[in-house]
Image (spheres, rainbow, N blue to C red):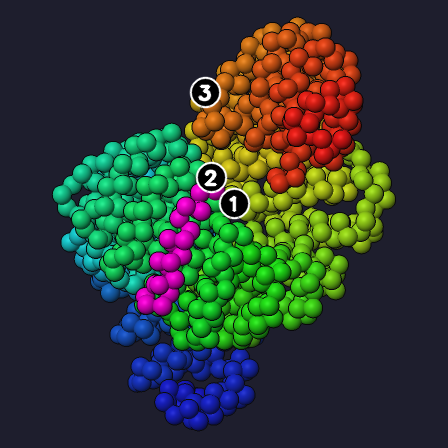
Amino acid sequence: MQLLHNLLLQSTSNDTDQLKAATAQLNRDFYKNPGCIPALAAILATSPQQAVRQLAAVELRKRISQKSGTLWSSLDRVQRDEIKAKLPELVVIETNNLVRHSAARVIAAIAGIEIPEGTWSDLLPFLHQSCTSEIAAHREVGSYILFTVLESIVDGFQEYSDNIYKLFAQLLVDPESLDVRITTVRSLGIVASYIDGDNKEEIRSFQALLPSMIQVIGQCVQDGNEDGARKVFDVLETLLILEVPILSKHILELAQFLLQCGSNKSFDNEIRIMALNALNWTVQYKKSKIQSLNLARAILEGLMPVTTEDEPEDIDDDSASRSALRIIDGLATNLPPSQVFPPLRDLILSYFGSPDPTHRRGAMLALGVSVEGCSEFMTPLMSQVWPIIGRGLDDPDASVRKATCVAVSCLCEWLEDECVAEHTTLVPAIMNLINHEATQRSACTALDALLEILHDVIDQYLQLIMERLAGLLKTAPLAVKAVVTGAIGSAAHASKERFLPYFQPTMDVLQHFLVLTGEGEEIELRGITMDAIGTFAEAVGKDVFRPYFPDMMKQAFQGIDLGSARLRECSFLFFGVMARVFGEEFAPYLPSVVPPLLTSCKQAENGEDNTVSASEAAAVFSTETSPDKGGDVEDIDFDKIMDVNSAIAVEKEIAADTIGTLFAAAQIHFLPFVESCTVELTNLLNHYYEGIRKSATDSLLEIVRTFYDLSKPVEWQPGKTSSVPLDSSVKDLINHAVVPLLDMYESEDNKSVASALCVGMAETINKVGPAFFEDHLEEICNIAIQILEQKAFCQQDPDQDDEEEAPEDQAEYDSVLISSAGDLVAALANGLGAEFGPAFNTFFPLIAKYYKKSRSLSDRSSAIGCLAEVIDGMKGAVTPSTEPLLELFYRALSDPDAEVLSNAAFATGLLIENSEVDLSPQYPQLLAALESLFKVTADSPAPRLNAKDNAAGAVARMIVRHPAAIPLTQVLHVLVEALPLKHDYLENRPVFRAIFYLFQNNPAAILSELDRLLVAFAAVLDPSVPDQIGEEIRAELLNLIRLLNAEQPAKIQAAGLSAYV
């Protein structure tokens, strides 16, 4: 034993050589022998050196746990019982806290083996005695041992749950020791993870302790005990994410408590941030309770004062004000906007009217973060928002002007049309702010966001903007140059070929940024420059960009080699853009581009070789086994495992996304890489970061679609099974992609990933047909059914009963998921055709329930749009459901929103076209409903103009279906006046079919509108505009023009159509 003691002592040396030698000898001569366990226990009990006792405890725990307890179990029972008898007493008398805790974990390791076997009956009485001792130090030891034992094994304590909860109730109110109270909260956090959702009695027992647990958190906050606060807030966050509704009855008190802690300036800043972060988790994970209790207003009122506090200079530093803004963002994205934006608007108006600039700044930042979740709700209210933005951009305080620029950036991202409409106000105001050093960077960021959306109106600003930005590229600090470069990229994106005059001069300047290698601002500028140059290439086209192509690819490869995740991300984005611009010309670069993409996808998040794998972590978490290599929980840095290195995660996300882009662009040349890329993308479907799962999903389905196109497929026919030959390799690829995607969905907790899966599968079904779903039809249908029923895993709410209906008023992001499920249903109808009939009976009520006045615009619009697409897919098989569909569409045709009216007109036209029921008796009522949609002006909003085009399509379908039921004289005049269609060119098909039909069957009626028709013909045939009618309609139209020329050549010539004769 003395040799073992000496080697342990040597292991504590700072001499690396001595440490290595001692470790090697310990591993070789002692640690594989069961006898080391009693020897280490003896050293733990007797060594005078605290460092040796500490190391002995750590190694003792490892040896006990080693190989699932094999070494421990090989000791005879007498030895094991002796150690079990002495260890608890040893921990009680140990004076050093670190050694005491390590020894407690030894007890936990033994308990993990002995308790399930029923061979340590003395442990529980000892723990109870220690925890109820009159000596505070003993209670601290007892509660900590109990905590460590629970960490190792909970099952053995289930039969004593009543007594355990009574003991916890005592310990939570320990009169002397905050440590006891904190440790007990931590123990309860472990117990909570094992509570069965059906065990209502245990849930009630736990809930009875929640007020005391919250008091302990409050005591840590009051005392400024940051370490203790961190531990108890961790427990609180665990309780929030559990599927068992432990906290549901205490959400009001919890939210009030966290808000009070987070808003109290007298508390330590770190503790305030913890409280606010916990409140953010409460909003995210208990949103149904927050919603049902209507707490948004009270939370917002408590947060707004916090938004006025100072922010740190470093964007990566956290603060109470930034935490408060995150919660406002969380409220906006998780709750119905009707609960969030009205009270927030009142607060913004109040705070913006304050003479205190910090209040005005807080109001602007709150407005900015709320836009993402409330954009649809805000749209009709923007007339109230723009005056505030105008005043903010002209505010006397620079911090308010900067905050307003942030708000403008957010508005441009989520409310594009509304921002473009304000360009005459926004562009001059932002350009003015660029002239001032204090607001230059923020203004350039806002200009970047605005320019990206100014497509049709950028001409009037392009020269002025480029002259000003070109000057800043030469004179501004690096940080400003980065945002200026981004803004120039956005200008190129919006102006397309109009950017040509500025292309070469800008490239001459930007190329100097591509040699920067310094950390921080230099790397950031280099990366943004790569992004901007990629945008230039798309704007000016491959022929103009080709001279720069090889050198820019060389720069992108150098960026990969510089060891920066940010530069690798930018290089991957650049490869994707170059592939899109150059298409198959990009093929020679594939052998150099694909390997680094795959390397990125495979890399560890922390960029270190010793990162613990998921399987190792899972093995450690298991209560039955431990890793064979002798490691245990304390050997693993869980912070390292759980910490998402955001830069590398985003890099992987971009890498995964780029793979799909490359295949779509390079086509057949990418085939050698399909298998390896598919395998790696499939592996990423299980990644913990939702952005990576989404990119992997998108790229996998893109690979399937591109591979299918390359197989030269025969056009598919609708049905449950594929009736046309399909290349066997395509079928294999489909199966390799679909199965893991469906597996991912089962446990997918992120709505944006589930939404991407629905949209991606819909697009793939529309491309590939029944071959995609024939082996998995039921599973794919169930995805849509679950989402429409709001019972998908990502929609589950533990605070809501299974039979309880989800509230109709929901967050805008929830509506996006519902709309995506509608896309999937429509694609299934398209793929199944007439065989979708039975499924329609299931889907119709699920979709129709989203058309109610109480539903959001997005819900109402997507419900009617989905049913329209379903009818288009089913064709005549929709006949049995004609009556309920028509009744629903009548209601939708009187909707107050133009977007719904547009879809309702489209859906009505398709129902008339496809149903075998004679709907001509409904024509007078339908025409009356459609008539108002034709009453638009040139400056009407885009949805209103779109509705007019869809109304024209509906009337055209009515004419072809039952011409005798149409009062042609009045109807034709209105229809022809609506031509040419300006927004929904797809509706040109039914419109021109009706025109051709009437020329063949009732020429007298249609010839009365000939002059106006010829103007429309000239417009759709104009070679200077993109095709609006398709080849089939074009051929028939040209034939009609030739026939008309034979009868009325003067009119054909006057209309400028002679060239088509």
The reply to whether discs 1 and 3 touch (Cβ–Cβ < 8 Å) is no
Q: Amino acid at mark 1?
A: Ser
Numbered range of the magenta stretch: 456-476
Residue 506 or residue 674, whichever sits in front:
506
Q: Determine the CA span between mark 2 and mark 1.
A: 8 Å
Rendered location of residue 902, percent (x, y): 55, 24
User: Residue at image x 37%, y 41%?
Assistant: 423
Q: Which residue is mark 2?
A: 813
Considering the numbered disc 2 on the image, is that residue within a helix, a strand or a loop?
Answer: helix
Q: Amino acid at mark 3?
A: Pro
Residue 481 is one of the magenta-drawn residues: no
Considering the numbered disc 3 on the image, is that residue within a helix, a strand or a loop?
Answer: loop
53 relative position to 506: left or right: left
Q: Is residue 72 visible?
A: no
**Which quadrant holds residue 601?**
bottom right
The reply to whether discs 2 and 1 touch (Cβ–Cβ < 8 Å) is yes
Q: Nearer the viewer, mark 3 or mark 2?
A: 3
User: Residue at image x 52%, y 19%?
Assistant: 933
Residue at the farthest front position: 1050
Q: Which residue is mark 1?
A: 752
Q: Determine the CA span between mark 3 and mark 2.
A: 22 Å
270 relative position to 587: left or right: left
Q: Determine the CA span between mark 1 and mark 3.
A: 29 Å
- Would you call the spot at circle 2 few (<14 residues within 10 Å), some (14-19), or many (20 or more)? many
Residue 146 or residue 488, whichever sits in front:
488
Q: Which residue is mark 3?
A: 896
Rendered location of residue 597, percent (x, y): 60, 66
Which mark is first along the chain, 2 or 3? Answer: 2
Q: Pick the quarter of the image with the N terminus.
A: bottom left
**Is 441 rendered above or below residue 764?**
below
Q: Pick the quarter of the image with the C terminus.
A: top right
